[in-house]
Amino acid sequence: MKHYFLTAAIMLLTTVGLLSCDKDSSDTPPTPAKTEMGFVHSVNIGDNTYVSVFKDMNVGSLNTDNALVMPKGAFSFVYKGKVYITDTEHIYKYAQKEGKLVQEGNTILLPSGAVAMCITFASDHKAYVSCHGLGKVIIIDPTTMEKVGEIDLAEYSLGKAVGDNNPEPAASVIRDGILYVALSQMKSAYTCEAGAYVALIDTKTDKPIKVVSDPRVSMASGESPAGDPFIDEKGDIYFYCVAMFGYQPGVKEGFLRIKKGETDFDKSYCFTLADVNLVGVKGNKTSYAYVKVYGGNGKVYAYLNIPGAASNPPDYVHDKCFQPFEINLYNMTCKKLDLSATAGWAAAICKSGNDIIFGMSTDEGMGYSIYHPATSTYETLKVKTSGAPYAVHELR
């Protein structure tokens, strides 16, 4: 069986799924209580991931007293105020009640080795789960918590000639009735096929339409949710291609775009971050962008891996070489933010209103810092955590 290269995802455990939607509605909507929780987050301690809710960024500090205890590396997603968690072979649904997460509905059991690493919600009764280990997209009803179908993508694997029938479906996004599923196209534990590949699926019939590709950059998604693909205000979809996290010679990373009204990659656009001269970091270069969030107006906030700040050989436990940056997709520039670099295993991020929240482990401590883009100001370690920040989402 093919093994999966998770150097920057599972090994470092720094992934984030960043999906959110409007709050649930009911026949008689209650007035929100003053104690209503505003965020769900997870931290890693030892061999576990602890998931809990908290009110806002004024809580000061967070512990794990009321947290769910999950296997280390469990991914979390939010849809209409409910929290969905996958430990790669199970999917759970939770609601917040009196400051705690309480399970709702069934636990969905997936086949062994499923590696369910992304959930994209189409509606209250339909969501797509990319199973990186199976080569399939599982369809579930997020209300009843039942499996209702599956889409086999084996025919799109580039390794069929050598018996590899798995194109590794990863992160996805829905636009205009089409599900765009990034395919990692792994060749081995440490290499991917050259080029970027994305499968298009009709959400009405759940039948594949085609696969689009681009040779300029490689690996259209990593093996964990990292804040892309996303759709900007113009309706354009952006994919970040991670190129084996900088470890495979001969392939390049970078952003690609599929414009509104089109279903093929925009041949006029490719933004390779490694080609940018970065001001304010050692070596002035990055090898790849890791977790990220779209902040609006063409700006992405992300952690860039800075090889010049790492040990030789890299020390994945102690090196703090993931630097927060603002990436402008429209003018193809990168600006270093005035925050300390973090370790690779503690790099969470989300957008809250107009602000960007960074979960980090720095020399100053572990917790959440806030960047206010409107005023270019910071609140460093606004909330301290008892574990390494792993994921944070607005609970809406």
Image (cartoon, rainbow, N blue to C red):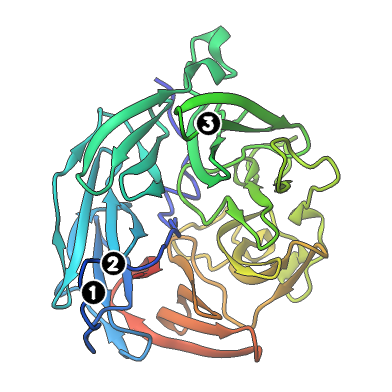
Q: What residue is shown with label 2?
A: 25
What is the quadrant of residue 262 in the picture? top right
The disc, 3 or 1, on the residue closer to the chain's N-terminal end is 1
Would you call the spot at circle 1 few (<14 residues within 10 Å), some (14-19), or many (20 or more)?
few
Label 3 – label 1 distance at C-alpha: 35 Å
Residue 153, placed above or below residue 302: above
Q: Is residue 243 visible?
A: yes
Query: Depth check: 76 or 161 in front?
Result: 76
Would you call the spot at circle 3 few (<14 residues within 10 Å), some (14-19), or many (20 or more)?
many
Residue 347 image offset from top left, x and y in percent: 47, 66
Label 2 – label 1 distance at C-alpha: 6 Å
Q: What residue is shown with label 1?
A: 29
Label 3: state its secondary structure. Answer: strand
Residue 365 image offset from top left, x and y in percent: 41, 82
Label 1 is placed on what type of residue?
A: Pro
Residue 77 image offset from top left, x and y in percent: 36, 56
